[in-house]
Image (cartoon, grey):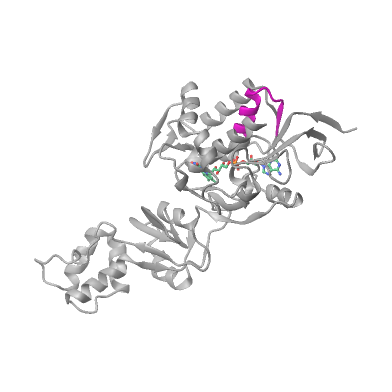
Amino acid sequence: MTTTHSFDALILGGGAAGLMCAIEAGKHGRRVAVLEHADRLGKKILISGGGRCNFTNIQCRPENFLSANPHFAKSALARYTPADFITMIEKYRIPYHEKTLGQLFCDRSARDVLTMLEEECRRAHVSIFPGTKVREVTRPAQFVVHASDAEFQAPALVVATGGLSISKIGATRFGYDLARQFGINIQEPRPGLVPFVLNADDRSRYCDLAGVSMEVTACCDGARFREKLLITHRGLSGPAILQVSSYWDKSRPVQIDLLPNHETSSTVMDPKLPRNLTNLRSQLRTMLPNRFADRWLDLHPASAWTNSALAQWEQQAHAWTITPADTEGFEKAEVTVGGIDTDELSAKTMESRKMPGLYFIGEVVDVTGHLGGYNFQWAWASGAAAGRAL
Ligand SMILES: Cc1cc2nc3c(=O)[nH]c(=O)nc-3n(C[C@H](O)[C@H](O)[C@H](O)COP(=O)(O)OP(=O)(O)OC[C@H]3O[C@@H](n4cnc5c(N)ncnc54)[C@H](O)[C@@H]3O)c2cc1C
């Protein structure tokens, strides 16, 4: 006979958002269960930030998030801030540091963050069910989650099953399928914070320089990021590229300023030097890595040595336009852009407008952060918003 467990709320997915939601609900006296299909909780937390978990960003603002409705995230982000998460980190005496641009990382290991969340769950009397394979969700009166060897029922169900990136550590389409089952609209998911694959021509031009990196400004669809670009064996990566990839779709070009420190068009040639290829090369080598500077000059020779020809030549380096063939896909993506349409949800509680008692939080929702700790901040904030409302 199948055992039936009854709770005040069931949370599907024991990642960042699900655990935060469980902690907040548990602290408010709710009897909550986290149902996780993997053998353990928080696998993505453990691999995040290169194993050090970039757990928040102290410069977090609503502008750091993409969504079909850019206002949706504001309420939750305002009610659970980076300072709130830092308070918890400090309560557990977890050593951390600011790496760059407001990004906070653990000094030791991402495991510190997961251990803290597990301990908070324990203190809030949260029941955890790892290795729970959910077969079906029905709603005869309450929500009933049918798992392989047990049933769970509750008046509230929180979907915190994350996005599609990195299926080998547990990502599934489950959250989107469940939304469709209940007639809830989704914005088509696509990979974000993901390297680009260049088209065949550009690959043959640049990819033998794999490993070369430089500071650039990358732009796509109105978004602009000044960070590092890295050439890879198949295309481009590095923070600047990962950031613009979230704004990219197949029809859009990406524009890269290779000389972001040299805004004016007269700087590239030192006026004291004779104008010739050797001097242009040595000037360019002061601004770009040598191998890339040489390649750029081979592919973009100066047509003449007049002021206007040089200005035009320099302009090309300020506006290198590429049209990637593709991205490296969900298996290399750090996040999923798109997801549960925010028009379907209350911005205050994350509850479905159509289906009372059904909540969506974290990456499964159409809110995607920039690179730099913003995605965890959204997971914490949306998880806390729902957890307090349960
Ligand atoms: C390599 C990598 C590094 C990253 N580093 C950072 C970083 O440093 N800083 C940052 O802010 N963001 C980072 N991110 C993004 C961040 O990890 C996610 O945005 C965040 O984990 C989303 O939280 P979530 O709870 O919504 O989803 P997840 O953390 O993905 O949790 C979802 C959980 O649901 C479970 N699940 C899925 N399907 C089911 C199902 N059918 N039944 C039951 N359980 C299910 C999964 O196993 C998982 O445990 C990184 C992502 C990757 C891939």
| Of the pair 350 and 64, the residue shown nearer to us | 350
| The stretch drawn in magenta includes residue 28 | yes
Describe residue 133's horizontal placement relative to residue 329 as left or right: right
Q: Look at 69% across and 25% down and name the residue there.
A: 30
Report the magenta residues as a range.
19-34
Q: Quadrant of residue 214?
A: bottom left
Residue 209 in view here: yes
| Of the pair 279 and 324, the residue shown nearer to us | 324
Residue 245 in percent (x, y) is at 48, 57
Residue 118 in percent (x, y) is at 60, 27
Query: Relative to residue 237, is residue 106 depicted above or below?
Result: above
Q: In which quarter of the image is the N terminus?
A: top right
| Of the pair 101 and 287, the residue shown nearer to us | 101
Splitting the image into four quadrants, where does ligand 1 fall? Answer: top right
| Of the pair 73 and 34, the residue shown nearer to us | 73
Query: Relative to residue 45, is residue 304 depicted above or below?
Result: below
